[in-house]
Image (cartoon, rainbow, N blue to C red):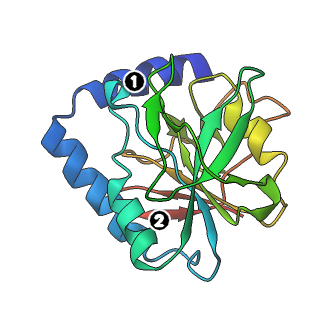
Amino acid sequence: MNKKQLRTLYLKKRTEFSEKDIEEKSQAIANQLLQCPIWEVTYYSLFLPIRSKYEIDTEYILALLQGKDKEVCLPKMTSDIEMTHFLLTDNTLIKQNTWGVPEPQNGLPVPNSEIDVVFIPLLAYDKKGHRVGYGKGFYDRFLSKCRPETIKVGLSFFGPETLIESLDPTDIPLDFCVTPHQVHEFS
């Protein structure tokens, strides 16, 4: 299937989950993350979920990161279709943007070159680590400015598709995708 078909399919699939389903699957994803070789670094980019889109609840991952004394960076979209990151602190003010994305409104900026691991929201992904997001390209533009060794971790309620058709040359593949039941590693 192509990206447009996959967006439609997986947006619909997610709406079939109850709040309890999302909570249980999100917690299972956080538990699976413990198996990933990503814990020896310092700076982690973590998105906050768009609840209206039935996204993974990342509060469990946030608790893991804080329990391991990691630095958590939250993305903020800018008007020029880019993302900047701010360090999450007790004083960070979070507010939804016009797309319903919870974002930091203040704080200490973190350069892309400092971020070691990026947790990436997605709708679908394939067995080669290619992913389908909402189609605006925020993450691909951001990832293209990170260090090559930055670890890219997708989070999904579902297993992989065999192949995503219609990839763009600017698409950046994942290193891992974590589901409630498995960690998929891509080379």
Per the image, label 1 sits on a secondary structure element best described as helix
User: Which amino acid lies under the numbered mark 1 shown in the image of this protein?
Assistant: Leu
| 22 displayed left or right of 136 | left
Left or right position of 100 against 165: left
Q: Is residue 136 above or below residue 157?
A: above
Where residue 113 sits, quadrant-wise, is bottom right
Location of residue 69 in the rendering, given as x and y in whole percent from the top left corner: 49, 78
Does residue 120 sit above or below 179 in this rendering? above
- The reply to whether residue 181 is visible in this rendering is no
- The residue indicated by pointer 2 is 183
Element marked by disc 2: strand
Mark 1 lies on residue:
11
Q: Residue at x 36, y 46 (%)?
A: 157
Which quadrant of the figure contains the N terminus? Answer: top right
Distance from the alpha carbon under mark 1 to that under mark 2:
22 Å
Q: Position of residue 9 (x, y in %)?
A: 42, 22
Q: Position of residue 82 (x, y in %)?
A: 75, 31
**Residue, x 58% and y 78% (percent of image)?**
37
Residue type of the residue flagged with mark 2: Val
Q: Residues within 10 Å of mark 1 (few under 14, many from 20)?
A: some
Q: Earlier in the sequence, mark 1 or mark 2?
A: 1
User: Which residue is located at x 29 percent, y 61 percent?
Assistant: 28
Check disc 2: other Cα within 10 Å, few if <14, some if 14-19, many if 20+: many
